[in-house]
Image: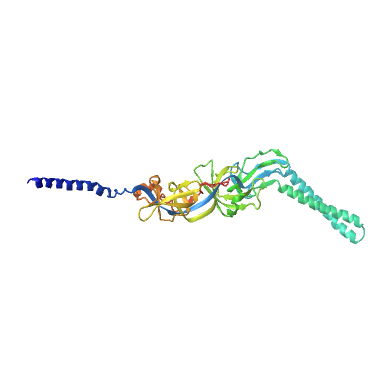
Amino acid sequence: MRYPRLLLPAAACAVALLAACKKPEAGKAAAPPAMPPTQVVAVEARRESVAESLSLVGTLTANEWVEIKAELEAAVMEIGFDEGKPVTKGQLLFRLDESKLTTALAEAEVNLKLSKVNYDRAQQLLRDKTISQQEFDQLASRYESMQATIAVRQRELKDTKIFAAFAGVMGARNVSAGQVIKKDTVLGQLVDLNPVKVEVSVPERFLSLLKLDQTIELRVAAFPGRTFKGQVYFIAPQVDTNTRTALVKARIANPDLVLKPGMFANLDLTLQLRADAVVVPEPAIMVNADRATLYVVDKDMNAQIRPVKLGVRAAGVVEILQGVAAGQLVIVEGVQKVRPGAKVKPAGPEAAAAYLPKAGEKAGKRESETARTDGSAGGKQ
């Protein structure tokens, strides 16, 4: 009987087939390999001084400015200044011919003496009742009239010399020595250029933020790379009903006299200064309609999205009023590649260096670039 020998190979094949069928099921239950973390560039939110400023346009004016006019008709005898040169307070600017006035004054003094003698005599005669009260009054009136004439002649003689009312710079002169001028002829201009003033109209909605002694910075086309600083000293007590603006004036130091009255000025008026504001690089901000967000990196190196409230936009950074604290890592590059909760790997310090403040910048303040006279604030989103 050989039939039992044939059953053994058949049983072995069945076992082999059963084992082969079970292998795919074991492979199906295995976990997929983990995704590597996404490399991003991240920097810490930091604290800086941020100044919210209002951008305006204004006009420069002189600190003091006068037209010098003649108060009498005479010939110009002397000019005591050079055009465009500084003069001191009390310096002689013009001397007019005084010969006629000197003669007129001498004549008036002689008449005054005679009138005084007649007046004194009339007093004695009135006491003796040898003249009437009317005659005495006429002599007394003449005496007083001569006194007034003397005062007028002295004043006219004084007006032949014109002195600088304040220290400043002389403009162009309109007359020459020897020229005969009439009364009210404009002889020249005297201008005080240090300091200069800037006048600007500020919309009424910003008036609650204005204060005396606020800092103001301005630039002029003649010196494009230079900034001039000053302080507000005047805020108009009323608003113009036509423009709904108020006149504001500030003084700007001008020791080298480079700023000239009439120049057009672009200026920034500091409205608020926050010395300890939290700022992040501008590329970290994502805006969708009126909602702003950014990605932060948590302690487990996961990217987490955060809604934030923005303040002013400064040079390359945005102020964060709410949502992120100083010292937290925020993603500035690679935000398109990450999802909330995804693992991230921050790049080295070399990649983040471009978003860090330059040497000496952190100690200074950032100026808002956004507030304008039309009331818009592009830095607030």
Q: Residue furthest bottom?
A: 127
Residue depicted at x 22% and y 46%: 21
Q: Is 217 displayed left or right of 78 in the figure?
A: left
Instruction: Using residue 120 as the reference point, say whether residue 208 is left or right of it.
Output: left
Q: Position of residue 181 (x, y in %)?
A: 71, 39
Q: Identify the residue at horizontal 88%, vertical 60% (top origin).
A: 124
User: Coloured how?
Assistant: rainbow
Q: Is residue 194 left or right of residue 137?
A: left
Q: Do we see residue 109 in this rendering?
A: no
Residue 226 appears at what percent x and percent y? 50, 45
Q: Could you say which is closer to the camera, residue 275 or residue 147?
A: 275
Residue at position x 85%, y 54% from top?
Answer: 141
Coordinates of residue 293 in the picture (x, y in percent): 45, 50
State the count of labels.
0
Q: Is residue 140 above or below residue 84?
A: below
Rendered residue at 85%/57% (across/down): 120
Picture coordinates of residue 216 (x, y %)?
55, 50
* Residue farthest left in this picture: 1
